[in-house]
Image: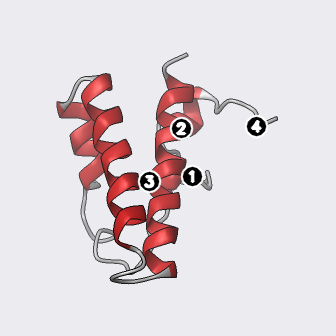
Amino acid sequence: MIEPLTQNEIEGADDVASARNTQVGGDHYASKAVQPWDAMGAWMSPEQFEGYLRGNVIKYMARYTDKDGLKDVRKAGHYLERLIEHLEGRK
């Protein structure tokens, strides 16, 4: 069974290997002071943010056979990881 994240992990501590601290498919967000999904998480309700994450999982899985193959499956997994972290943080 997967253990729930601690509050420190949920807040994205630098030493934690979480979806918030990694990027799949490049490093184009790494130079940003605020990660886009952190901004969205702050500006959206928890339910809206959950929908955003779910929508991206669906998007990448729906297109992987037509676009970037395994890279898109990895991106879907990355969003799924972040969704799990989000849901564990809401307990």
Q: Residue at x 58, y 38 (%)?
A: 9
How far apart are labels 3 and 1 at the CA level? 11 Å
The residues tagged by marks 2 and 4 sit, at their Cα atoms, a distance apart of 11 Å
Identity, as a three-letter code, of the amino acid under mark 4: Ile
Find the distance from the CA under tag 2 to the CA under tag 1: 8 Å
Mark 4 vs mark 1, CA separation in Å = 13 Å
Whether residues under marks 2 and 1 lie with C-beta atoms below 8 angstroms apart, the answer is yes
The first of marks 2 and 4 along the sequence is 4
Choose mark 2 or mark 1, whichever is in front. Answer: 2
In the rendered image, the vertical position of residue 73 relative to residue 19, given as above or below: below
Precedes in sequence: disc 3 or disc 2: 3
Judged by depth in the image, the label closer to the viewer, 4 or 1, is 4
The residue that mark 4 highlights is 2
Please name the residue shown 17% across and 32% down the image.
Answer: 43
Q: Name the residue under label 3.
A: 79
Inter-mark Cα distance, 4 to 3? 17 Å
Mark before the other along the chain sequence, 3 or 1: 1
SS state under label 1: loop
Could you say where residue 4 lies in the image, as x and y percent from the top left? 68, 29
Q: In this view, does 50 lie to the left or right of 23?
A: left
Question: Who comes first in sequence, dot 4 or dot 1?
Answer: 4
Left or right: where 86 falls relative to 32: right
**Number of the label disc, if any, that sits on residue 10:** none
**62 is higher (above) or lower (below) than 65:** above
Q: Residue 18 carries which label?
A: 1
Q: Considering only order in the chain, which callout, 1 or 2, is on the residue closer to the N terminus?
A: 1
Label placed on residue 85: 2
Please report whichever mark, 4 or 3, sits nearer to the chain's N-terminal start: 4
Position in image of residue 87 (x %, y %): 50, 28
Q: What residue type is labelled 2?
A: Glu
